[in-house]
Every structure is written in structure tokens, then in C-alpha cells.
Amino acid sequence: MTTSAKISSATVRADFNDPVAVVHYARAAHQLGLWESERLLIARFFPDQNARLLEAGCGAGRVTIGLWALGYHQLVAFDFAEELVDQARALVEERAATIPIHLADATLPLKPTVTGEALFDGALFMFNGLMQIPGRDNRRAALANLAAVCRPGAPLLFTTHDREYSRVERACWKLEVLRWEKGQQDPRLVDFGDRYFEDDVGRTFMHLPDRAEILADLAASGWTHAYDVMRSDLARESSAVQDFSDECRFWVAQKA
């Protein structure tokens, strides 16, 4: 039975803690590793392997352990789903890495117990993690909280969908505009652009922005836009990566 209650952070946390989702993300962390597009952008925008980096929304540790394998050993990671944090910690131990994995919520000010005393040289929020935060004000809060613990000029790498990228997407969202105008949208959704997917890998909340929205959110939260590109224009990914994830837009911003 579908409830009409608005999707909240508690909803998303429960979905990520669901055993089906945990297995899905843990398998990717152990077997999939970094995408080719991620490798290219990490090398380009984080050229110093001694940089102190913060990974938000680390999930089961796929990107975390990938960064470690590339030589980034001044790394701190966190996620707000307890079960995924446990998986990430187990993966770090299995790979004999030394990476603190914290339980924390990006929409709340990050505590010194998570960040330490020094500012970070860069931050990452990968695999659409930022877009899995319900509510635009909450997404802006997460961006501002990351900015608060990064030095000026520090890069931030993250991904989103882009609801205006393809002809098919644009047509679908024209229909969604009509649903919202008539009040016929899924009553659980918070903002226009939200989707709530339910499939064989569990339930997934996702906000699909357009480019103008992200540019405005960066400007409002202490970041300046530096670069963006669709994944398919950057690299040809393996079939395993394409099966795991849809097309997305990579963003790079700098701490103002």
C-alpha cells in the first residue's frame, strides 16, 4: 500500500539500510570499482595524491577504496546509512586500507570528530548522492556544509542526472509539468524533478535537476562552477558500469 507521506531523509535512510540495497551497493564496491570517467576526472582535478580529501555519501565504499588504490591516502569518508557504513568499514579492513569511515549526515554541520581540525583540499559526492537528498534547501545545506570544511579554491566533484539532456527526457518532463500543474504528481514527492523508483535493487529517491538549477545551487552555497560534462562525452564505460548506472552529468565546482 502506497503512503502519501512526503519522502524525507528518514525515508531515504531506511531505503539505503534495506538489505536488498545493501547487497546491491556492497557488490559494486567489491567488484565494480571506479568508472573510467571517474578515474579521468579524479586525475584531472585532484592531481596531488597527498591532498586531504573528504568523500560525502560514501555508501559501501566503492569510490572510497578506489581512491585509496589510486594513492589518495589522506582520505576521510562518511555516509548517513548505518548498514552502508558498516559495509564500507568492512571493505576498508579487507583491503588493508587506513580510511576513517564516519556515520554523518551531509545536511547537518559536519563535526570536528568527522572532519578533524584542518580544512580539506577537495571533496567528492559521487554517484548522484547529492541528488538523493530530498528537498532543495537540504541539498543546498549539504553543499554549504561541504564548503565550510574546504579551503578556498578546493574542488568538489559530484554527479547528477540532467532532465533536459535528451529528447526523450525533455518529452517525459513536459508531461510531468502537466501533472504538477494539475496536482496529479506522486504525492510523496517534494520538488518538481523528484522521482521515486522501486525495482529489483530496492527503492531509490532521486532528484533530477536541470543545468540552471545546479548552477544556482552552487552559487547559493559557497561554490563557483568550474566544469561539467555528460559521462558519455567523457569516456566509454564498460557494460558492467552501464548496467549499474544510467547516464549522468559530472560537475566540478571550486570553493569560493
Image (spheres, rainbow, N blue to C red):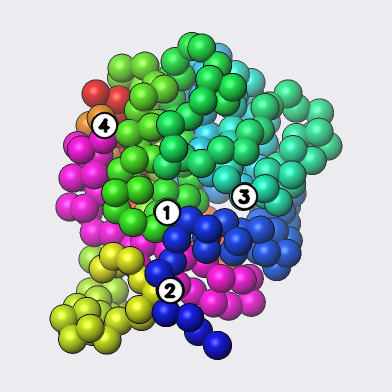
- Residue at 35%, 47% (x, y): give it: 139
In this rendering, which labeled residue sits more in front, label 2 or label 1? 2
Q: Are marks 3 and 1 in contact (CB under 8 Å)?
A: no
Residue furthest to the top in view is 118
- Residue at 23%, 83% (x, y): give it: 183
Q: Which mark is residue 5?
A: 2
Q: Which mark is residue 81?
A: 3
- Residue numbers of the magenta segment: 194-221
Residue situated in front as seen by the camera: 134 or 39: 134
Mark 2 or mark 4: name the one nearer the start of the chain: 2
Q: Are marks 2 and 1 in contact (CB under 8 Å)?
A: no
The local secondary structure at tag 3 comes to loop
Q: Are marks 4 and 3 in contact (CB under 8 Å)?
A: no
Structural distance between the alpha carbons of marks 2 and 3: 21 Å
Q: Is residue 11 visible?
A: yes
In this rendering, which labeled residue sits more in front, label 2 or label 4? 2
Q: Give the amino acid type for the residue marked by disc 1 in the picture.
A: Ile
Q: Are marks 2 and 3 in contact (CB under 8 Å)?
A: no
Q: Are marks 1 and 4 in contact (CB under 8 Å)?
A: no
- Magenta-colored stretch includes residue 200: yes
Identify the residue under disc 1: 133
Quarter of image, res 150: top left
Q: Position of residue 5 (x, y in %)?
A: 43, 73
Structural distance between the alpha carbons of marks 1 and 4: 18 Å
